[in-house]
Each structure stands twice: as C-alpha cells, then as structure tokens.
Image (cartoon, rainbow, N blue to C red):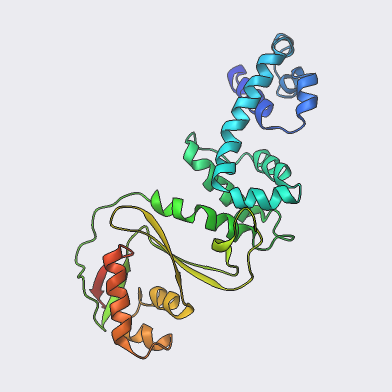
Amino acid sequence: MTESRTLRLQRALGSLVLDGGEAAIEADPGRVARRHGLSGSDQRSFREQVPAMMIYRELARLSLIEPLESMFPVVKALLAGARSWDGCVQAFLDARVVQSSQYRDIAPAFLGWLAATRWGQDRWPFLLELAHAEILETLVARFPDSEPLEGLHAHPGPGDLVVLDPATQVVTYAHAVHRACVEAPVPEARPTHLLAFRDGDGMARLMELTPATAALLVQAQNRPIAEAAVAVNLSDLAPVTKLLYDLRCDGAIAGFRPAP
C-alpha cells in the first residue's frame, strides 16, 4: 500500500531533524524530500525555505538533546572529554527509538538504547551503570503512585516477608558510579549497592548498603526474614529487624506480611 503524502512529508521532516550531516542538509534540503518520495514541488518548497527549515531543525533537535544534557551531565562530561558526546547523541537519534510525545520519556529512552546497543561500553564498561545512576532518583521519584498495599503490618517478625514500596529499587553496580561527578566522571571500580526510595515527603533518596544488607532486602522478599538473615551471615536478628523497621518508617519498605 502506497504511503500517503502526509506520511511521507512527516518522514521527511523527521529526517530533516534527526539525520546527521547538517551541512549537506543545509546545502540542499530538497534531497531529504526526494529521498522520501515527495513530489518535485515539495522538493522545491524544501529548497526555497532553507532558513526556516534549518531553524526548525535546530529547535526540534534542541528539544531532544536538552533532556540528555540535563539528565546525564556526568555521561556528557565523560564523552565530551573524549570528543564522543556528539557522536553518541547522533547514534541515539539515528536509532529512532523515541516513540513517546512526552519530554520526560527522552532520557529513559536514551538509557534503554544504551542497554540495547551497548554503545561505547567496550571503551567505557561502566557507561550504562553511570547513565542509570544519573537518573535513578528521577525514575524513583516519577514512579506512578498506587493505592496502599493491604494486609501489611509495621513491625517485622522472624517469619515475615519484606514488602518493598513499589517505587523502591535495590541496585547493584560494579563501579561506584553514584560518586562520579562532572569534574571526575570515571568511577572507581568497586561493587556498590544502593537503595533508592521515596521518603514520607515523596522525595527520592539514595542510601548506600553493605553487600549483606542488599542481599537481605532482596532475599527477604521471598523467604522469611530469619532465614534470609542466616543466608547472608547476619546472625543477630535484633539489628536486622531494627534496620527493616527504620526503612519502613523512612518509606523504603511498605510493610511486612507473614510468609506462606
């Protein structure tokens, strides 16, 4: 089935914005129209409106690139230092993975693209972790609100399971990416465990965990707290239950329920 002129025009405008090679596009934007099967008159219109076309390209690209620069400043600093930031952004735009019309979805789409393509990760094996860490708090803060979970109690017992708040994430990285900054964007290579959650005021928070605590929070969601504690070599249950109770008060844990 032949594409309509409207669809071909949309695709041509998309290429005008997303394609690399700005100098070639500015020299002859009609080539973009021709490549998408538009008529000679449409191609002439593209050529006759070069200044307007290039302003449109600049503004539309800015709306796509600005969220990346604001949400991933450390990634940008790392790649810009190696003169690779522009190439990374163009590769992302070339992939055409941004399907949402929401501005807020651009940064997560970039993260997903990094995960799917592994772009740059032969050179920077921590790149995906760094990008994830940069928007982790934002992902937690934006997690959709839900109705309070029923059937939970506030004080953990040895036979209970831990029920995390739906927005809470327990994350393990191979690098201390949460410590990287624009001035020092290369993180230390050491295993790092983080708890990301929303506090009682709805603000996202990060807490660095010990390996045992991180493993406990993961395991105790599916096995009784006492069993999980033994499995991760936490023999004294009193400090374990106190920690879990404190995390419930902080908002990371929704509550506790008896194991089946």
Query: Does any portion of residue 224 appear in the rendered image?
Result: no
Q: Which of 252 and 82 is in front in this view?
A: 82
Q: What residue is rendered at 28% in x and 57% in y?
A: 200
State the image quarter where residue 245 is shown: bottom left
In the image, is residue 212 above or below residue 24? below
State the image quarter where residue 215 is shown: bottom left
Q: What residue is rendered at 24% in x and 53% in y?
A: 147
Residue 219 placed where, x, y %? 40, 77
Residue 156 placed where, x, y %? 24, 77
Q: What residue is rendered at 63% in x and 68% in y?
A: 188
Q: Which of 244 and 183 is in front in this view?
A: 183
Residue 182 placed where, x, y %? 62, 53
Q: How many circles with numbers are drawn on the protein?
A: 0
Q: Which of 185 and 222 is in front in this view?
A: 185
Q: What residue is rendered at 23% in x and 57% in y?
A: 148
In the image, is residue 237 above or below residue 139? below
In the image, is residue 40 above or below residue 242? above
Q: Nearer the viewer, residue 102 or 1?
A: 102
Query: Does any portion of residue 159 appear in the rendered image?
Result: yes
Residue 247 placed where, x, y %? 32, 69
Which quarter shows the C terminus? Answer: bottom left
